[in-house]
Amino acid sequence: MNRQDIRLLQSIHDYPALSILLPTHRTRPANSGDPLRVKNLVTEAKKRLLNEYSKRDLEPLFARLDKIVSEIDYEHTLDGLAIFVNRDVARQFSLPFTPKERVIVDETFATRDLVMALNHAQRYWVLVLSEKPARLYSGLRDALSEVTGEGFPLVHTGPGGTGPLPGGKGIDNSAYRDDQQRHFFRQVDAALKPILANDPLPLVVVGIDRNQAFFKEVSQHTSSIIATLHGSHDKTSAHELAKLVWPLVEAYLAEQSRSTLKELDAAVNAQRYVSTMGEVWRAAQEGRGRTLVVEEGFHYPARLEGDGRSITPAEDPTAPDVVDDAVDEAIETIIAKGGKVVFVDDGALKEHQHIALILRY
């Protein structure tokens, strides 16, 4: 799951759009009941839709729903599951948090939980360097999902890949193959470029030493690489690969948190920061935020005041004029204006009321 997935789902305004969310389980025997829970919710969804439409009208939607449900990997579920289906689109995502169980039929998909996951959970990219194929994964904490349809997976179809090497005297096949590999990894790097531009997350690179060396030689994105995992993982599943990669990401994130807290202390001494949700909100709207530092579990339902640059806390987050979570909105604003966001452990920013913003000026 990545921002492109969310944007696709949020771009759809076409009734009926079906959203099914439910808690799931990572291990046996608890996950043995998950298929039945999904089946019951699918049955509920179909009954609700059949109250409004004929079975014939719903055939395309039901076909997509049945197909996407049949593809759920119950052996490798996480803490939750989200299914989104209409007549044209079908997506399902495993979630590293527990959503409230519900079935929603509306003209838009219920993406709030996914937005929260993107904004509050540690995310990263994993690039597996191989010639058959090179694969890209979106990481959300300890879960990976493969990115497809955006240039990946990418297969080396030239000489030395699926194509034969040239023959004849005087041709150094070894050197020629090396040049072709470099060319292929330039293609991989080019496919990565718009993805990193759209969602500039930390990057973990996986592959044998030879491939890693070629990629670093030709890549324009080496500054995004936070860790490398060496070895052949062409056939490693996303579930198993996540077990190997997540500890590397955790180590990086822990160091990043320590470094950012030191940076915040320096900004406090230089009086180049603001704290509390209200002050952070105003500075974010003005484009002054360079680095947002926020506790992972901090949420803040709020009402907008005046021109939208001020907010007040809201007791009832379900009220129609309330922003569900001003922290989510501030994160989106700061990222859109070129800032970055660093999460720290709950309690680390107690003196700042759980959130602080290092300012550009």
Image (spheres, rainbow, N blue to C red):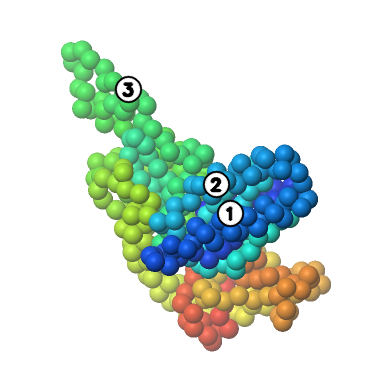
Quadrant the C terminus occupies: bottom right
Q: Nearer the viewer, residue 82 or 61?
A: 61
**Mark 3 surroundings within 10 Å by alpha-carbon count, few (fewer than 14), some (14 through 19), many (20 or more):** few
Which of the two discs, 2 and 3, labels the residue nearer the N terminus? 2
Number of numbered discs overlaid on the protein picture: 3
Amino acid type of the residue tagged 3 in the rendering:
Gly
Residue 83 badge: 1
Residue 102 badge: none
Residue in the image at 49% along x and 80% along y: 346
Residue 107 point in image, percent of width and height: 74, 52
Do the residues bearing badges 1 and 3 touch, measured as CB atoms within 8 Å? no
Quick check: 230 left or right of 135?
left
Do the residues bearing badges 2 and 1 touch, measured as CB atoms within 8 Å? yes
- Distance from disc 2 to disc 3, alpha carbons, whole Å, reads 35 Å
Residue position for label 3? 163
Q: Secondary structure at mark 1?
A: strand
Q: Based on the displayed image, in which of its 4 quarters is residue 329 positioned? A: bottom right
Residue position for label 2? 68
Quick check: 113 left or right of 217?
right
Which residue, as the protein is rendered here, is positioned at the far left? 169
Asked if residue 83 is positioned above or below residue 251 in the image, the reply reads: above
Amino acid type of the residue tagged 2 in the rendering:
Ile
Residue in the image at 34% along x and 53% along y: 241
- Is label 1 or label 3 in front? 1
Q: Secondary structure at mark 3?
A: loop
Residue 124 point in image, percent of width and height: 45, 57
